[in-house]
């Protein structure tokens, strides 16, 4: 049974930091990309950061310079360090793991991140 378990969300003030972590288990073939997406109320899910197996990372323009993603291929984990958080970062954040074969995207259950004073 495949599981993606996210942790680290919560409520912080503007300018604060949070670190999200995601651990994938049960995927028996190679995981290609891992990453993070988010969905704010009334909006579509959007890319935050996506990192290839080789470590190349793509960030949304809105988070460049503030967020950093990293992964551990041996542990099937991906992290998202979020600094200088803004109210517009408030959303449910979802972890992604892209299975190589058969091709399939697994998603975590989502974790709430709220930025408010």
Image (tube, rainbow, N blue to C red):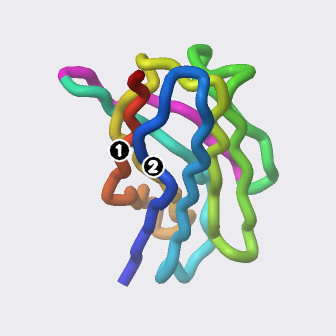
Q: Residue at x 64, y 70 (%)?
A: 76
Give the SS element for disc 2: loop
Residues under numbered marks 1 and 2 in contact, where contact means CB atoms less than 8 Å apart: yes
Q: Which quadrant of the figure contains the C terminus? A: top left
Left or right: 4, with 48 as reference point: left
Residue 97, given in percent of the width and then of the height, sits at: 51, 58
Q: Residue at x 46, y 68 (%)?
A: 102
Label 1 to label 2, Cα distance in Å?
A: 6 Å
Q: Residues within 10 Å of mark 1 (few under 14, many from 20)?
A: some
Extreme left residue here? Answer: 42
Extreme front residue here? Answer: 117
Q: What's the mark number on residue 7? A: none
Residue 66, given in percent of the width and then of the height, sits at: 69, 25
Quick one: 28 or 103, which is closer to the camera? 28
The residue labelled by disc 2 is 9
Up/down of 82 relative to 104, above or below: above
Residue 45, given in percent of the width and then of the height, sits at: 34, 31
Q: Which quadrant of the figure contains the N terminus? A: bottom left
Give the SS element for disc 1: strand
Quick one: 1 or 29, which is closer to the camera? 1
Looking at marks 1 and 2 on the same chain, the residue that comes earlier in the sequence is marked by 2
Left or right: 69, with 114 as reference point: right
Q: Is residue 51 magenta?
A: yes
Q: Is residue 115 magenta?
A: no
Boundaries of the magenta span = 42-52
Q: What's the mark number on residue 112? A: 1
Q: Residue at x 57, y 15 (%)?
A: 62
């Amino acid at each position: 049974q495949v599981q993606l378990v996210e942790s680290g969300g919560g409520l912080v003030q503007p300018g604060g930091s949070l670190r999200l972590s995601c651990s994938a288990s049960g995927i028996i073939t190679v995981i290609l990309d891992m990453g993070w997406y988010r969905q704010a109320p009334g909006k579509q899910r959007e890319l935050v950061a996506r990192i290839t197996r080789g470590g190349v990372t793509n960030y949304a323009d809105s988070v460049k310079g503030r967020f950093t993603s990293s992964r551990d291929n041996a542990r099937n984990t991906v992290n998202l360090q979020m600094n200088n958080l803004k109210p517009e970062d408030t959303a449910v954040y979802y972890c992604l793991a892209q299975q190589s074969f058969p091709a399939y995207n697994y998603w975590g259950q989502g974790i709430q991140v709220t930025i408010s004073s």
